[in-house]
Image: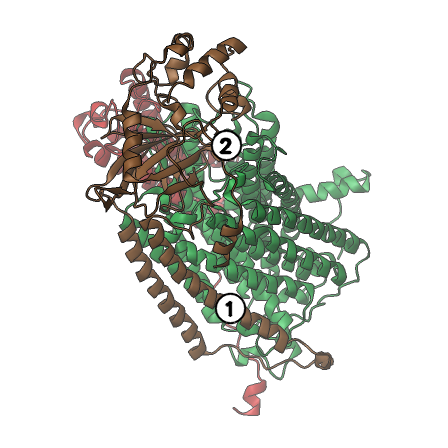
Amino acid sequence: MTAAPPSPQLQGAAPSLARLHEWVVTVDHKRLGIMYIVTGLLFFMIGGFEAAMMRWQLAWPGMDVVMPDEFNRLFTMHGTTMVFLVGMPILLGSANYLVPLMIGTRDMAFPRLNAFGFWLFFFGGLLLYFSYFGAQGLYGMGSAPDVGWFAYAPLTERTFSRGHSTDYWILGLLVSGFGSIATGINLVATILCMRCKGMSMMKMPLFVWIMLIDAILVVLAMPPLAASQIMLLFDRSLGSHFFDPQNGGSAVLWQNLFWFFGHPEVYILILPAFAFVSEIIPVFSRKVLFGYPLMVAATVSIGFISLGVWVHHMFAVGLSPAVNTAFMASTMLIAVPTGIKMFNWIATMFGGQIRLHTPMLFSIGFLSQFLFGGLTGIMLAVVPFDWQVSDSYFVVGHFHYVLFGGLVFTIFAAIYYWFPKVSGRMLSETLGKWHFWLLFIGFNLTFAPMHVSGMLGMPRRIYTYQLERGWEFWNLLSSIGVLFQALAIAFFVWNIIRSLRKGKPAGDDPWDAWTLEWTTTSPPPPWNYDIDPEVRSRRPLWDEKHPEDPDWKYE
Amino acid sequence: MSTLQSNALPDLAPVNNLPKGKLGVSLMIVSEIFFFGTIIAVYLFYIGKDLNGPYPQDVMDPPFSAATWKPLAVSFNSIFLLTSSIWIVLAVRALRAGAMARFAVCWGMTILFGAIFLMGTGTEWYGLIVNDGLWMDTNLFGSCFYTLVGFHAFHVAAGLTLMTIVLVLTMCGYMDKRQAGKVDLLSWYWHFVDVVWIVVFTIVYIIGYYG
Amino acid sequence: MWIVLTTSVITTTASAAPICAPGMMPTAGVPSMFDPRSAPAEMILDITWLVTAICAVIFIIMQGLIIWAIIRYRAKHADGDGSEPPQVYGSNPVELAWTVIPLLIVFVLFLVSARGIFEIDKQEPPAGALEVTVVGHRWWWEFDYGAQGFTTANELHVPLTKDGESQAVFLTLESADVIHSFWVPQLAGKKDVVPGRTNHLWLQPLEIGHYVGQCAEYCGAQHANMLINVFVHTEADFNRWVANQQRAASQNNDAAKGRDLFLSTACINCHTIRGTVANGTFAPDLTHLMSRATIGSGIVPNTPDNLRNWVWDPQTIKPGCDMPSMKLTKDETDLICTYLETLQ
C-alpha cells in the first residue's frame, strides 16, 4: 500500500505539510469520502451544540439562557446544518468511499468532479457559518440566518429579514448544493458505467442500488431548490416580486417550490440509512438479505413516489380539500414500500444467528426507532390529525425519530462497520456499547416526550412558553436527555481517537462479510483491487467461502 | 442436476455499462431541465397576475409579426440561435473526419451565430428597460421575464465561452479528431440550450403574449 | 387515555385578576387536542383514535417481531464452529402478503380520513354563523366583528348559542404581513394565515369556557408570544360583551389630561380609539383595552403595573416587538395609563 510519491515542489518540505498537500489536492474517492464524512461529523458536533442550547433554553418556561433572536438563529442554523452540512455530506461521502469498492472499480467516474463537489460543499458550509460575523447589514442588524431552515416567504423578503443573514442562507446553500448535484451526477455515472465483470444491475449490492436512486433524486430535487433560492435572492437584491404578496407575488408559491425539493430531500437523507442496514443486518444475522428483487422494486418506488407527496407539508395552508386528499393518498402510498423494507429486514434476522456487535446494535435501534417514526408519519398523513399537530412538537418528534433515530443511528452503525476497512483498525466494542446505550436512552428521552407536548398544543420554533400550558414536564424530560446524548458522543469521539492509535488490527475481513470491499486490504490500496474482480452473484465473497453452495445457484 | 453441471461456474452475466461521458453530460442536462422547469413553472403561474403594467402586450410585438424579424429582434435572433445548431453539427462531423479547417470554420460560425443571438437579447433588453420602463422590480412580468430569458442567455454565454476555448485550442493546434467525442458532448449542451430557447420562446412570446 | 389523565393532573395557575373580567370565566386548561370543546375538534379526535389504534397495533406487532428475533435467533457460542444458518433468499407468497395487506390498511385509512377532510373543512359559513375576520399581525391578533361594527384585539369572544341553538363561528383569516397560523387545539385544527390569501376556519363551541392557543407558524422574533385567548360565553353574556364593545371610547373627565397627552403623541398613528382622532390600524385597537384580561397578545395579565411597564417600554416585556419606547417621562406615563385605564 505505498502512497503516491509527493509532488516535486514539495520535496524537502516538512512531511506533515506534504501530507496535508496530498489531502488537499486528492481526487481519490476514498480520501474524498473520508473528508466528506469527517467534515460532516464536525458539523454534527456544531449542530448538536446548537440543539443543546435550545434544549437548555426550553427546559423550563421563561428561561433566558439565550435572547429570542439568538434562539431563532439557533433553530435555523441547527436545521440547516443537520440537513445540508451533516446529512448530505456524510451520505454522499459514504457513497463516495464505498460504491467504487462495492462495484469492483478503481475510482468514481469523474475523479476531478468529485473533488470539486467536496470543496464546494466545504466552502458553502463555511460561507453559511461566516454569516455570524459577516451578515451585518446597513442597520447593523443581521447575524446568522433566523428564518427557519425552510425559510418561508415573505418572512425572508427584505422587509422582514433585515441585514444579510438570509442572503448567507441562500448563498451558502447554493454553493454547497451545486457540489451535491456534481456528486450526484458522479455517483449515477459511476454505478451505471463502471461495474466490474459479471455485475449486472441485479447483482449489485443493495447498497449500490439505493445509492443510485438516491443520487438520481439529488440530481432531480436540488436544481429546483437552486432556482427558488435564486428567485428569492432576486427578490431581496433586485427588487423582483416572486414571493412578495404586496406586489402580486405568492407566499404559497415558495412553499410549493421549496417542498417540491424538500420532500425528496428527506428521502435523499433516509435512503442511505436503508442502504447501510441492508448491508449490516445480513452480515450480523449471518443470512442473505431477504427478498432482494422486492427490495429493489421498493427502493425505486420510494424514489418515484417521493417526488409526488410534497404538499403534505402544507396541509394547513388552506388548499382545497381535493388537493389535500390527493396528496394524502400519495403520502399514504409511500408508506407501503417503506413498510416492505422493514418486513424484509426483520425476515432477514429470522432464522439467523444474530451477533450483537455494535453495528448491529445501532441497526436494531434504527429498526425500532424508524418504525416508530414511520408510524407517526402515517398519523401525520391523516389530514385532519395533521391539522392539529402540524407545525407542533409532534412533527419535531416525528422527524427526529426518522432522521436521528433512523439516519444518525445507521450512520453510527456504518462507522462501526466500515471503520476497520477505512483505517485498518477495529473500534472498541466496549466503548461502542457505552456509546449505543447512552445514545439510545438519551435520544428516546429527548424526543419521545415531544409527541406529547405537540398534542398538548405546543407549536414549533418558540423560544419560550407559558407555565399554564402544562408543557414544562415534557420539555424538562427532553432537556435531560441531552446530557445522555452528549456523554454518548464523548464516548464515540474517544473511541475514534483511541482506536486510530491503538485499535486492534482489522485485517481484510473482520466481520466475515460477503461484498467486494472485504476482499481487498484494510485500508485498500489507492487502486482498490490488484486484479479486476469478476462476480457471479450478489455476494461474491460468500461464493468464495462456500464453493459447495454458492449464491448464484439460488439468485 | 448432474455433478458436472453443479460444479461448473456459470457464465458471467452481461454488464451493459453505459459510456460515462455521454451519461454524465445527459445527467447534467437533466438537472438543468429541472432547473429551467422550475423557472418556467413560475412563469406560467404568474401569467396574467400582474397588478400593474407594462403588460406583455404593451412591450412585445405579436409573435412572428414583421417587427420581430428586424435585425436583432426576437424572431430574427431565434433563427440565428437555431441555425447555430446546424453549424455545430457540421463542425462535429468535420472534426470526426479530421477536416480541421472545416471544423474551425463551422465552429467559428456557431460561436458567431450564438453571439449575434446574445447581441439581440441585449438590444431587446435595452429597449425594454430604457424605453418601456420594464425591469425586474416593475411587476411580476418583469421579474419572470428577466429571470427566465436571463438564465437562458447566461447559459448561452457559458456555452460560447466553452466553445471559444475549444476554438483557441484548435487555432493553437491542440485539437484533432481524437477529441471528437468530447467536442460532441459540448455540442449536446449547445443543442440543449437551443431546445430550451424553443420552449422559452413559446412560453414568453406566444403563450405569455396572449395569456 | 393516560395523556388526558396527566392533563387533568397538571395544575394550572390562574392569571392575575384582570380589571374587568368578562363574567365568571373558568380559567383555561391545557390546550390539549384530547380535550375538545368544539365540533370540528371532536371530529378530528374521533379520526385520531382510529389512526392511533391502527398504528399502535402495527407497532406492537412489528416491535414484538424485532424483539422476538433478537431473543430467539441470537447467536449462541456453539455457533462459533463456522456453520451458517440456512440462507433464505425470499418467498413470493410472503412478500406478496406483506405488500397487499399494508395496501389494504392504507386504503381503509385513506377512505376514513378523506371523508373527514370534506366534512371538517368548510368553505362557506354554516347558516346563522357568527362571522369574524381574523387578521394576523406581527405579533398580535386583530378580530373584526364586521356585522357588529367593531374591531378588537387579542381576545376572540363567541357565544355558545344564538336563539337557543348552537351557533357556529366562521372565521375569515387574513394576514397583514407574513404567514401566521391560527391554532386553538380545543376548538379546531389549525389554519395558516397567509398574506395575499383568504382562508377560513369553522368552530362550533360545545361548552362555555376560556380556551387558549397561539400562532403556529414562525413569523419572526416574537412568534412565541403571539397568544390567542378565546372566550365562549352564554348568549346573554356575549350580547353584553358585544354591546360594550360597540360603544365608542368612554369620555371620563378624570383622565382628560391623559387623554389629551395621548391624542397629541404618535400613539394615534398606530392605535385606534373609537370616538377620538386616534385611528391607526397598525397596532391593536385600544377602545376597550380594559375589557381584556391580558396585554401584549396574551403574555402578561392586564394589571396596572404591567400596563405601566408596557407603556413606558414595551421592549422590556416583548423584546423585538414593533412598539418602541415612546421615551415618556414618569409623569407622562402615569397620565397615559390613567387615561387607558378608563377605556373599559
Q: Is residue C156 above or below residue A26?
A: above
User: Residue B39 lies in what quarter of the image?
Assistant: top left
Kind of residue at badge 1: Ile
Residue at position x 51%, y 60% in the image: A372
Q: Is residue B62 visible?
A: yes
Left or right of A422 on screen, residue C296: left
SS category of the residue bearing label 2 = loop
| Numbered mark located on residue C60 in the image | 1
Tell me where residue C83 appears, x and y as whole percent: 67, 82
Tell me which numbered mark, 1 or 2, is placed earlier along the sequence: 2
Q: Colour of chain A?
A: green
Q: How is the image coloured?
A: by chain
| Of C332 and C344, the residue lying toward us | C344
**Chain ID at mark 2:** C
Q: Name the one closer to the observer, C185 or B126.
A: C185
Instruction: Estimate how packed mark 1 is, as few (under 14), some (14 to 19) or many (20 or more) residues with alpha carbons within 10 Å.
Output: few
Chain of the residue under the numbered disc 1 shown in the image:
C
Which percent across, then down, holds residue A173? 52, 38
**What colour denotes chain B?**
red
Q: Is residue A82 left or right of residue A419?
A: left
| Colour applied to chain C | brown
Using the image, tell me which numbered label, if any, was put on residue C16. Answer: 2
Amino acid type of the residue that numbered disc 2 sits on in the rendered structure:
Ala
